[in-house]
Amino acid sequence: MRVDAVTLFQSMIDSPLSESIVGRAREEGFLELGFVNPRDFTENRHRTVDGKPYGGGTGMVMMAEPVYRALKTVRKKNSVVILLTPKGRRFDQALALELAKKKHLIFICGHYEGIDERVTPLADMELSIGDYVLTGGEPAAVAVIDAVTRLIPGVLRKEDATVNETFTDGLIEAPHYTRPGVWRGQKVPEALLSGNHKLIAEWRRAQAQELTGKAKSASAVKKKPAVRRKNFK
Ligand code: SAM
């Protein structure tokens, strides 16, 4: 897959996506990541890419023309152009699976107060990674590219590694444990130590259903405390 990012801050994407599984996917050619900077498409002496908002207000707005020109250099017939914005469609695993099948994705990353609204019709999709405001589209692009890349066949060493994952089959994944069997007084559930594959599968399914049931209503998720403290010995 080819991915291009239209961004003023390349390293905010390039650096985090050079590590771990995505870094390896780039080295092995599963993901080809390119960047295009709107600043290279300005015509003024100072290479200015932003201006004051019409109607007044704080902050600066990215101008449409440099973004348009930058996009034009990478856009092809089969490209899916994604404009990152907090008002976009909420990103989720189903969309990650859909995007992982595409040949070419282009992410337009806003910064400052955002991009001139007239750029919006250039995109196939407006996308948000959640109901909060980031400094720029770059961290959002990182999250989406990461989630999509690990779904490209061959990227994860075991092909089935994503099959039972949270959200893939509509269920939250059962919890994982590794050595030691007892850690600071907390035991690994008996079923997982049984060596009985049927029992283990049943336990995992039951856990997944229970966790999914608990998280089902959005309000339940929101009310859940961020950290469940335990007193460690
Ligand atoms: N003034 C805008 C507003 O109130 O909606 C926020 C602009 S934000 C500071 C700058 C850029 O960050 C946006 O243009 C967008 O590209 C990106 N961004 C911020 N939050 C985001 C989110 N939740 N999902 C996707 N992109 C986001």
Image: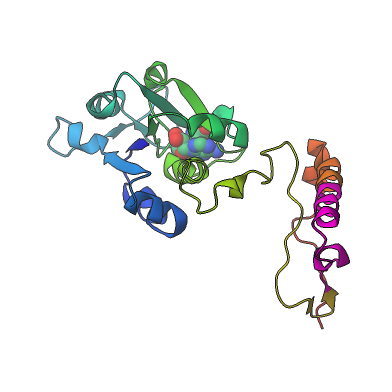
Region of the chain picked out in magenta, as a range? 187-207
Per the image, is 190 magenta?
yes
Q: Is residue 35 above or below residue 230?
A: above
Q: Position of residue 167 (x, y in %)?
A: 68, 40
Q: Position of residue 149 (x, y in %)?
A: 46, 43
What is the magenta segment's predominant secondary structure?
A: helix
Q: Is residue 96 above or below residue 228?
A: above
The answer to whether one can see residue 48 in this image is no
The answer to whether one can see residue 74 in this image is yes
Q: Is residue 115 above or below residue 26?
A: above
Query: Residue 130, located in which quarter of the rendered image?
Result: top right
Give whichever of 19, 56 is nearer the camera.
Answer: 19
Question: Residue at image x 37%, y 43%?
Answer: 31
Give whichever of 75, 47 is nearer the camera.
Answer: 75
Q: Position of residue 97 (x, y in %)?
A: 55, 33
User: Which residue is most to the left?
Assistant: 45
**The C terminus: image quadrant:** bottom right
Q: How is the image coloured?
A: rainbow
Question: Residue at image x 52%, y 43%?
Answer: 147
Query: Residue 196, located in which quarter of the rendered image?
Result: bottom right
**The N terminus: image quadrant:** top left
Position of residue 223 in the picture relative to residue 10 (left or right): right
Question: Residue at image x 25%, y 24%?
Answer: 72
Per the image, is 168 magenta?
no
